[in-house]
Amino acid sequence: MRAARALLGLDQKELAAIAGLSVPTIQRMEASEGTVRGVVESLTRVVEAIERAGVELIADGAVSSGGGRGVRLKRSARPSEAAEGVDREEGR
């Protein structure tokens, strides 16, 4: 959710407004570890709002139907591991 908001340039208040939810609901969803947790209706509203705003959500292992360029997080990559890999490649 945070990544989608960043792509759209939205803060939590703006996402809450376009999804028809409260800011605390968005905050709770974003505070979830791993899979976003919440009431199915609220999750559906967020997904629909993000998609209407122009972000394509791509399921794990799925192919993007919209084409174009994009990014996807590798399951095994952690920010600290990625930084270590860059350091090793640059000879640091």
Image (cartoon, rainbow, N blue to C red):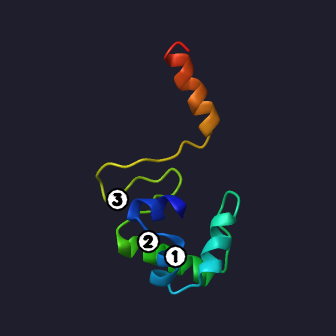
Q: Identify the image quadrant of the C terminus.
A: top right
Callout in the foreground (1, 3): 1
| Cα separation between marks 2 and 3 | 16 Å
Q: Which residue is mark 2?
A: 50
Q: Position of residue 56 (x, y in %)?
A: 40, 63
Can the viewer see residue 7? Answer: yes
Vertically, is 91 above or below 11?
above
For the residues bearing labels 1 and 2, Cβ distance under 8 angstroms: yes
The amino acid pointed to by label 3 is Ser
Residue 64 in the image: x percent, y percent? 38, 55
Which quadrant: the N terminus?
bottom right
Residue at 69% of width from left, 64% of height from top? 32
Q: Amino acid at mark 1?
A: Val
Q: Nearer the viewer, residue 49 or 17?
A: 17
Do labels 2 and 3 touch, CB within 8 Å? Answer: no
| Residue matched to label 3 | 65
Q: Position of residue 67 (x, y in %)?
A: 30, 54
**Counting other residues with Cα less than 10 Å from the Cα at mark 2, is it few (<14), some (14-19), or many (20 or more)?**
many
